[in-house]
């Protein structure tokens, strides 16, 4: 199994925590609003083929929180800066949930960010029917209940959720949540101008969704597809908001086929 | 000390099964539950009650701002305050206040309060709360994490508008204004006294003390529980080497006066229960959006008054609990005098605000409570702390009080 290391990289005047592992071409993985779960099974599998970079967004995990990062657009600016500095432009990327939104914002700003990109259960576009679930008025347990369609098929369940969080982990989660709020409170989890700006995207884009996503309605897969000409869509059946955790084998298969 | 009459303007007709049907009286309670015809009656009653308080000798009358709720149908306290400014003559008009971060530009607050000050002839006390989580982050969609920063900047805009008597520019993080030049400007110089209601957060104490304003604790759970918060405030005042003038503190207490202690229970119990069980029913996640308070405040266990704990106590408590725990000071005039004096001395309250219309209390009962309080209680406590000057009171009213005392 590829060995992951934890590194600290100085970017834009602050420290960025990055898990890095594997070998091959770089693959940038952008986590969702809930925080960086580290190199889970899917990341280990991808690291067999790629050098996986899994940073904790500014304000998350052990990364610093620069005061100027107040919106998803600021975050996208931060990451294009990171890419330029680290020579990681024109790389493959996967964005999960809010990380998918982040990838989409970066795509809307520059053609140099990614060579291929996967948007997985991505936030960022407002559904026409229904709403993206408000995760800020429910507790972590309730969020988890909504994220996973069928917990019994989550291979890493015990490892991830088997024990109660330590006080440090709980405090970390609170900090992560604050950062998510800073970035996504208003308007909630979307940017009304994003669909129009995505028309410029010309890199291969794969939109992947769990069929039973209870957080970001699967309808949004179609909206991203409409916004990005030539994109392809895959919907994984019998699966919730996080296919990479709930059905890692199916997810990795789809990712490797595309990337 | 100053004694003021506070009104929340509650909506009284929530159904008996309200708690089973709805998880909150705030934020998302459908307004199909609001009957405008009844609302019309309540506004008339409540405005009359505030005017009456001004007539019978209260030092001030207080209104405040809340949104999306049945707890208080006063989303714009300035509207009520302008009516009062025009139709009362005696005491202060205390607006507690405008949640500054909600107004864009905040110059609007500077303008409206200046209007109230001028209409009232210089009797305005201006309150600048951050606002509850329910009001600001849910009902008005503010980002919780930047709320306090925005509030501070908005305050600076208002102060600039009030104190600079020529056009000025403001370029802040949230507000960019090319010409600040309000008409009218306030009557009081350099500006109306400022009071800041807070829920017991450290950052608010320091914010208030940095600017030499009055800190107000609007307590729903009375003086015994409020004592913990207020003690923290006075300790902070001492730590910072600031004088302990009791007028640095405003405190709201629920009060029910009747002929005897037994009569108080008979008269008021159901209305007080309505207040605790229905008005304070807040779906806990609304009571504190993540990021609304600093991690420091959370560590010090300064919990919000509403939310989980409030709902628990509401279900369990009866009249005896309300009295024993000091949530409500109630009873005969003698009992109320004794307890209220004790409360004011214990907490060093220089600006006492009393809530005499509580929950579903009908007008006759409010009048009785107000009369008994004004005649049998107020005269006995007004002399407290009179050795202290009160720089946080409209100048005009200070001189009048002095003359009255001279008579």
Image (tube, rainbow, N blue to C red):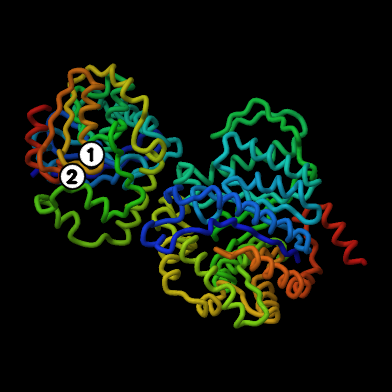
Chain letter of disc 1?
Answer: A
When asked about the image quadrant of residue B260, the answer is bottom right
**Neighbourhood count class around disc 1 (C-alpha, 10 Å): few under 14, some 14–19, many 20 upward:** many
Q: Nearer the viewer, residue B291 or B403?
A: B403
Q: Nearer the viewer, residue B125 or B283?
A: B283
At horizontal 25% and vertical 36% (from top left) the residue drawn is A30
Q: Which residue is mark 1?
A: A54
Q: Are marks 1 and 2 on the same chain?
A: yes
Q: Percent position (x, y) of residue A248?
A: 10, 42
Q: Is residue A52 left or right of residue B224?
A: left
Q: Contact, CB < 8 Å: mark 1 with mark 2?
A: yes
* Residue B4, placed above or below residue A118: below
Q: Is residue B243 visible?
A: no
Q: Percent position (x, y) of residue B226?
A: 57, 68
**Neighbourhood count class around disc 2 (C-alpha, 10 Å): few under 14, some 14–19, many 20 upward:** many
Q: Nearer the viewer, residue B137 or A32?
A: B137
Q: Percent position (x, y) of residue A179?
A: 38, 44
* Residue B25, placed above or below residue A132: below
Residue B144, numbered circle: none
Q: Is residue A61 visible?
A: yes
When asked about the image quadrant of residue B159, the answer is top right
Q: Which residue is mark 2?
A: A39
Q: Earlier in the sequence, mark 1 or mark 2?
A: 2
* Residue B64, placed above or below residue B309: above
At horizontal 77% and vertical 75% (from top left) the residue drawn is B380
Under tag 1, what secondary structure? strand
Image quarter hosting the N terminus of chain B:
bottom right
At horizontal 68% and vertical 30% (from top left) the residue drawn is B180
Under tag 2, what secondary structure? loop
Q: Is residue A2 left or right of residue B141?
A: left
């Amino acid at each position: 199994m590829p060995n992951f290391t934890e590194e600290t990289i100085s970017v834009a005047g602050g420290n960025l925590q990055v898990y890095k592992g594997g070998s091959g071409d770089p693959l940038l993985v952008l986590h969702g609003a809930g925080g960086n779960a580290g190199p889970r099974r899917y990341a280990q599998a991808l690291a067999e083929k790629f050098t996986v970079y899994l940073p904790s967004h500014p304000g998350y995990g052990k990364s610093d929180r620069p005061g100027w990062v107040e919106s998803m657009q600021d975050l996208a600016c931060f990451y294009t800066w990171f890419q330029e500095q680290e020579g990681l432009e024109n790389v493959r990327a996967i964005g999960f949930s809010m990380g998918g939104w982040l990838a989409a914002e970066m795509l809307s700003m520059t053609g140099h960010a990614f060579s291929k990109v996967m948007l997985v259960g991505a936030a960022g576009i407002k559904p026409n029917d229904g709403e993206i679930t408000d995760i800020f008025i429910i507790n972590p347990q309730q969020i988890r209940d909504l994220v996973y369609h069928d917990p019994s098929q989550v291979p890493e369940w015990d490892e991830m959720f088997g024990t109660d969080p330590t006080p440090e982990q709980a405090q970390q989660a609170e900090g992560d949540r604050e950062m998510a709020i800073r970035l996504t409170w208003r308007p909630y989890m979307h940017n009304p101008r994003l669909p129009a700006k995505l028309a410029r995207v010309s890199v291969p884009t794969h939109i992947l969704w769990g069929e039973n996503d209870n957080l970001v309605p699967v309808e949004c897969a179609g909206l991203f597809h409409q916004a990005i000409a030539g994109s392809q869509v895959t919907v994984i059946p019998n699966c919730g908001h996080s296919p990479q955790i709930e059905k890692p084998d199916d997810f990795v298969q789809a990712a490797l086929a595309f990337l | 000390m100053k004694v003021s009459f506070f009104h929340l303007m509650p909506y009284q007709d929530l159904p008996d099964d309200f708690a089973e049907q709805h998880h909150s009286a705030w934020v998302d309670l459908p307004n199909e539950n609001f009957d405008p015809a009844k609302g019309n009656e309540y506004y008339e009653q409540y405005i009359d009650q505030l005017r009456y308080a001004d007539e019978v000798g209260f030092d001030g009358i207080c209104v405040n701002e809340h949104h999306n709720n049945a707890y208080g149908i006063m989303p714009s306290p300035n509207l009520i305050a302008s009516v009062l400014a025009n139709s009362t003559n005696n005491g202060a008009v205390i607006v507690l206040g405008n949640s500054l971060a909600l107004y864009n530009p905040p110059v609007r607050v500077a303008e409206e309060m200046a209007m109230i000050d001028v209409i009232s002839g210089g009797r305005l006390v201006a309150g600048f709360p951050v606002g509850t989580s329910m009001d600001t982050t849910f009902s008005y969609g503010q980002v919780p994490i930047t709320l306090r920063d925005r509030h501070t900047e908005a305050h600076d805009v208002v102060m600039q508008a009030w104190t600079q008597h020529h056009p000025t520019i403001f370029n802040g993080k949230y507000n960019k204004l090319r010409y600040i030049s309000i008409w009218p400007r306030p009557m009081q110089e350099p500006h109306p006294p400022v009071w800041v209601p807070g829920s017991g957060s450290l950052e608010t104490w320091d914010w208030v003390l940095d600017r030499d304003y009055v800190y107000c604790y609007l307590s729903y759970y009375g003086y015994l529980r409020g004592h913990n918060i207020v003690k923290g405030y006075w300790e902070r005042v001492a730590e910072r080497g600031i004088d302990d003038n009791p007028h640095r503190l405003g405190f709201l207490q629920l009060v029910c006066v009747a002929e005897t202690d037994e009569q108080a229970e008979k008269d008021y119990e159901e209305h007080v229960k309505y207040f605790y069980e229905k008005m304070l029913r807040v779906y806990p996640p609304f009571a504190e959006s993540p990021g609304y308070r600093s991690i420091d405040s959370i560590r010090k266990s300064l919990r919000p008054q509403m939310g989980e704990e409030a709902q628990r106590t509401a279900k369990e408590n009866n009249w005896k609990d309300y009295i024993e725990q000091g949530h409500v000071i109630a009873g005969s005039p003698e009992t109320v005098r004794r307890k209220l004096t004790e409360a004011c001395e214990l907490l060093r309250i220089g600006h006492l605000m009393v809530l005499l219309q509580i929950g579903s209390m009908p007008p006759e009962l409010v009048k009785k409570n107000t009369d008994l309080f004004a005649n049998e209680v107020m005269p006995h406590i007004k002399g407290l702390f009179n050795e202290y000057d009160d720089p946080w009171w409209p100048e005009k009213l200070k001189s009048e009080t002095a003359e009255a005392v001279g008579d």
